[in-house]
Amino acid sequence: MNSLDWLHYYQQNKTNRPEPKWGLPSPLDAKMQRALSRSLSHFQLGETGEGKFLIAQARAQLPDDTAYHQALELFVVEEGEHARLLQRLVHRFGGRTIRHHWTHTLFRFVRRALGFKFEIQLLVTAELVGTAYYRLLQTRTRDPVLDEACTLILKDEAQHVDFHADWFGDFQSRLLPLEREIWSAQFQLLFTAAAIVAWIDHGYCLKITGANRAEFFREARRECIRFLKQLSQRAARELNSLMAEITSADC
Ligand SMILES: [Fe+2]
Ligand SMILES: [Fe+2]
């Protein structure tokens, strides 16, 4: 993984960001606005946080990779920017942000209980499920401001998935094929659980927009498959460069 490249990416990405045109009126009816404000407030809470635990864990696990620590800090800042956009959307649709929700409490408890690697895994599952959610909102609603905010968030989330795939690609290149299969199986189980929890929480809102369960899961599964493919490509690349190093050292 090239942590410096990621650090530069995050430094660049925080400049010249377009701002949605918040003043535009919403064409959505009151029922849909209410459902959206409730659902978006839960995602807003999920995107909030200083990431202190995550960054402390990264420093402890990878003490020499300071560029990765800094990139991770900027990644957390970017999630905070999503929280800001979502907060404005919640207000736009007449709702209020929240400070507690069972999904958030569950997410925080699980991710802190099982260490750094697991925390990153859980973050990836949230990114994949979130991507499916934002994409469906964007396709199914006709609110110009929601559309602009979703475009901004989706663009960042695609890079976040890439960032984590890079990190996991490094880790996977050191695993035996069987270990890799086991890791992939547990990741897919975790992803499925996260998607089910997300549907329980946001299904009502998505149904009001016209989306259905099958569509949500199809979209989320597509994201998961894409991530796993990225991961195996990166692991293969890492493995090839490792083999090349070994071969040149033997010569
Ligand atoms: Fe985000
Ligand atoms: Fe993200």
Image: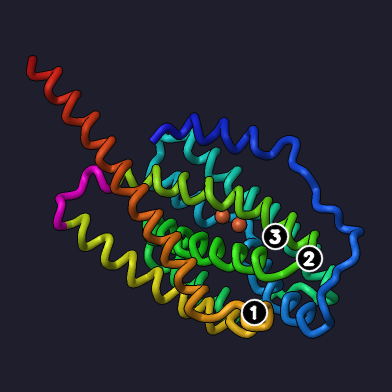
Which residue type carries mark 3?
Answer: Ala
Q: Residue at x 54, y 34 (%)?
A: 7
User: Which corner quadrant holds the C terminus?
Assistant: top left
In the image, residue 173 lies in the stretch drawn in magenta: yes
Q: Position of residue 152 (x, y in %)?
A: 68, 51
Q: Is residue 96 left or right of residue 207?
A: right
Q: Check the image and report above or below for 18 versus 132.
A: above
Q: Earlier in the sequence, mark 3 or mark 2?
A: 3
Q: Position of residue 9 (x, y in %)?
A: 57, 34
Label 2 sits on a secondary structure element that is: loop
Circle 2 sits on which residue? Answer: 143
Which residue type carries mark 2?
Answer: Asp
**Residue at mark 2: C-beta within 8 A of ligand 1:** no
Closer to viewer: mark 3 or mark 2: 2
Circle 3 sits on which residue? Answer: 83
Which residue type carries mark 1?
Answer: Gly
Q: Earlier in the sequence, mark 1 or mark 3?
A: 3
Magenta residues, as a range? 172-178
